[in-house]
Image: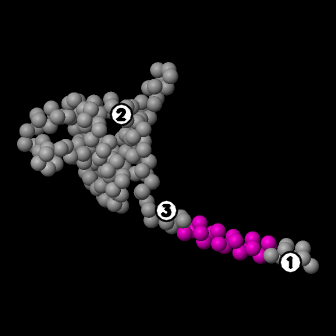
Amino acid sequence: MNVQSTAQSDLISKMIYWDMLRLYFRVKGLWDAGSDRFFEEQDEMPNSVATGFWELIQQMIERSEMIHDAIAEMGDDGQHFMVGLAGKLNSDAIANELYNRRMAWRGVWGEFEAMVPTFAKDIAHIRFMMLDVQYFSSRVAVALFFCVGFSLLAIPTMTTFFRIIVGLMW
């Protein structure tokens, strides 16, 4: 693989990564500091998608060297990144920081962006799952219109078929 195609695949991986984060927050209903607005919650995200996203962020956190230092530097302000008594990191809160790209976390989100090519398949899979569950009502409406259209087209088709069969028999 040449250098140009590697750079292109890295760029595509990063674009998919940002799209995955955007889709996640759009469904979850979290704050988007980039546009100073609140993403309104749309549909409930299925557990399989939310779990997949959580596991992906956790894998990236485990490989991160800077994230624990960044949280420790925040002191008491960093407590919202912790979940439970075990002190596990809250994937939603960390993903929110990664998406909003606050300058205080520049090293952390830079490190995560550098890891994106390593997790490209996982990121693409989670993004596909997120896209697959969105706009359920629109998908149902399209399926209903398809069934109605198929039924309406079946009437003249069957009529013609029976006329041909009857014509061949007589």
- Label 1 – label 2 distance at C-alpha: 65 Å
Dot in front, 1 or 2:
1
SS for tag 3?
helix
- Three-letter code for the amino acid on which mark 3 is drawn: Arg
Q: Earlier in the sequence, mark 1 or mark 2?
A: 2
Image x and y of residue 1, in percent: 50, 22
**Front residue (pair 106, 84):** 84
Q: Which residue is mark 3?
A: 139
Magenta stretch?
Answer: 144-161
**Residue 155 lies in magenta, yes or no?**
yes
Q: Are marks 1 and 2 in contact (CB under 8 Å)?
A: no
Residue 80 in view here: no
Q: Are marks 1 and 3 in contact (CB under 8 Å)?
A: no
The one nearer the camera, 25 or 87, is: 87
Q: Image quadrant of residue 147?
A: bottom right
| Neighbourhood count class around disc 1 (C-alpha, 10 Å): few under 14, some 14–19, many 20 upward | few
**Residue 116 — which label?**
2
**x, y percent for residue 99:** 29, 42
- What whole-number distance in Å separates the C-alpha atoms at marks 1 and 3? 40 Å
Magenta part mainly helix, strand or loop? helix
Q: Residue at x 29, y 36 (%)?
A: 60
What quarter of the picture does the C terminus occupy?
bottom right
Mark 2 and mark 3: span between their CA atoms? Answer: 31 Å
| Residue sitting at the far right | 170
Marker disc for residue 166: 1
Residue at image location 34% in from the left, 60% down from the top:
44
> Amino acid type of disc 1?
Val
How many discs appear? 3
Residue plotted at (36% across, 49% down): 23
Going from N to C along the chain, the mark reached first, 2 or 3, is: 2
Q: Secondary structure at mark 1?
A: helix
Q: Is residue 154 left or right of residue 16?
A: right
